[in-house]
Structures are given as structure tokens and as C-alpha cells.
Amino acid sequence: MSTSEFSGKTALVTGAAQGIGAACAAALAGSGVAKVVLVDLDGATLEAMDLPCEVVRVAGDVTDEALWARVEQACGTLDCAVLNAGIAGTPALLSDMSYEDWRRVVSVNLDGLFLSLRSTMKLAAKGAGVVLTASVAGVKAEPGTGPYGASKAAVLHLAKIAAKEGARRRIRVNAIAPGGVDTAIWDAVPMFSDLVEKHQGDRAGALEEMASYATPMGRFQSPEEIAAQVLFLLSDAAGTITGTALVTDGGYSL
Ligand code: NAD
């Protein structure tokens, strides 16, 4: 993949302050985009991010409709977008799940994604590339993942709808569906915290044990690996790929 194809372009990344979003922002900036618009709840971390291109930081909640007027103004037109902000929520069986917990996850992962996608489809230039961060949890059903799995399955379907709506303008919309990625999102998952405790604080050991349960390749991925795959989907090499889900999970879903 030639890196210069991103030169001069404007990119939007949500959930950009850490994890997969931060890795995507760094990869885009490193590949020559002229301007990145970074959106995250964590304005302080956005402020501290140093990238080799023009950086516009918009602190706020992707579920806040008013935020999107500010983002639209900051972007102008868009050539690339990585709509990635999401939360895992607290795992619970459907029979035990509070409506509040359900709403919280669906609100960020689906309502927030809708608002992000609406603005993106409005601003996208002809030939733009868009990637939505879904999850393998939206492909493979697991107990305790109700609102997360259902919202991510909806994201996979929204990618297809947006792909059809954007096709005449040559706007490509794809989803990426990662399995376990080593980011802070896991710190809020009680099962993972228990494993870290069992491994006496050794996070790498806990990740290895997690991966050994159900991932044939036996490892988690890094945010940088996911970012490289997102850049492929945004690149000219993926020029006829639209409406697909790239499942990247070390075989977890097989
Ligand atoms: P992370 O917690 O490290 O980063 C998420 C970022 O999104 C944070 O900076 C957070 O502040 C921001 N964010 C959360 N809610 C927001 C909101 N309402 N408005 C604005 N910003 C918000 O997590 P991550 O692992 O990098 O996750 C990124 C995406 O990848 C999520 O959509 C997640 O569901 C998905 N994903 C992660 C994994 C994994 O194993 N880490 C696997 C599959 C999918």
C-alpha cells in the first residue's frame, strides 16, 4: 500500500484518545493525512496528543447531538472516517440486566454511532472511505454480552446500509470486527480484573490466559495491528470493498 495516497486528506476518528482510536489516528497521521479531527470524551488526553499533521480536537460525548454540529464545522469535507467510540458495559445475563445498563451501552455503541455516521455521510467527499468499529461480539453470541453484542451486530448491518446509500458517490463503508485487542476497555470487565489479580498484576499473563480459552491463535491483538487493517480498508487497495465486515479475531469466531 502506498502511503502517499492519504496525502492532503482530512480524516475523522472518534474514540481517539486511547486504544484502537489513538492507534488509527497515529497511523493516519503517519500515512500523510493533512488533517485529523479527533473526538473523545477525554479532552485532556486529546490535548496532549502530538501528531505529525494538523490536529483538531473536539471533546465531547458522541451521543450528544449538539456535539456533531461542532464536529461538522471542524471537518469541512471528509475523505476518511474511523467511527470507533464504544464501551463494553458490565457483563450480565439478560435476566439480570438492568434497563439502565442496557441503555448505556446501546446509547454509546449504536445511537452514538448513528450520529457519527449521519454527519460522516453528510460530509463525505466523493471516493471517501469509512470504517465502523464493530466487534466479533456482534458475530458470535456469548452469554452476558447482550447490549454489547446486539449493538455491535447492528453496527455491522448499518455498515451495509450506509455502503448502499453511499455507493453512487463512491463512498465505501466497511466494518471491522476485532476479537480481543489489548486496550483499557478490558480493565472494566470483572472477569479480566480477576485474571489480572490471579496473575499477581501481570496484565500480559492475564491476556495470554484469556486468549487461551477460545482463540485458536492463542493471542490478543495490538491496537496497531487493528489500525493497519483499518488503513487497508480506507486505502485504494480496498477500492471495491464496501459493506463488508473484516473479522480479525485470531480464529475466535470459527
Ligand atoms: P478504549 O476504552 O481503550 O477506548 C475507547 C475510547 O472511546 C476512549 O478514549 C473513550 O474515552 C472513548 N469513548 C467512550 N465512550 C465515548 C463517548 N460516549 N463519546 C466519546 N468518546 C467515547 O477501547 P478500545 O478497545 O480502543 O475500543 C475502541 C472500539 O473498539 C470500541 O468500539 C470497542 O467496542 C471496539 N472493540 C474493542 C475490542 C477490544 O478487545 N479492545 C474488541 C472489539 C471491538
Image (cartoon, rainbow, N blue to C red):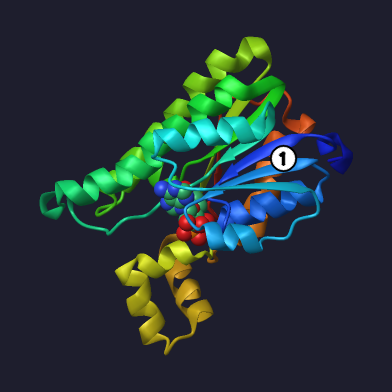
Tell me if residue 110 comes above or below residue 40 in the rendering. above
**Measured from the top left, where is residue 36 in percent x and y?**
70, 43
Q: Residue at x 67, y 28 (%)?
A: 76
Name the one closer to the observer, 103 or 157: 103
**Measured from the top left, where is residue 53 in percent x and y?**
79, 49
**Measured from the top left, where is residue 161 in percent x and y?**
48, 20
User: Is 101 left or right of 116, judged from the image as shown?
Assistant: left
Q: Quadrant of residue 206?
A: bottom left
Name the one closer to the observer, 161 or 56: 56
Q: Is residue 237 visible?
A: yes
Q: In which quadrant is the N terminus drawn? A: top right
Residue type at mark 1 is Phe
Q: Is mark 1 within 8 Å of ligand 1?
A: no
**Measured from the top left, where is residue 177 in percent x and y?**
51, 44
Name the one closer to the observer, 196 or 47: 47
User: Is 143 left or right of 186, judged from the image as shown?
Assistant: left
Element at badge 1?
helix
Q: Please identify the residue farthest to the bottom as the structure is shown.
A: 200
Name the one closer to the observer, 153 or 29: 29
Q: Residue at x 43, y 30 (%)?
A: 114
Tell me if residue 3 comes above or below residue 121 in the rendering. below
Q: Residue at x 42, y 61 (%)?
A: 214
> Dot 1, crowdedness within 10 Å: few (<14), some or many (≥20)?
some
Q: Is residue 153 visible?
A: no
Residue under numbered circle 1: 232
Q: Residue at x 80, y 52 (%)?
A: 30
Q: Quadrant of residue 245?
A: top right
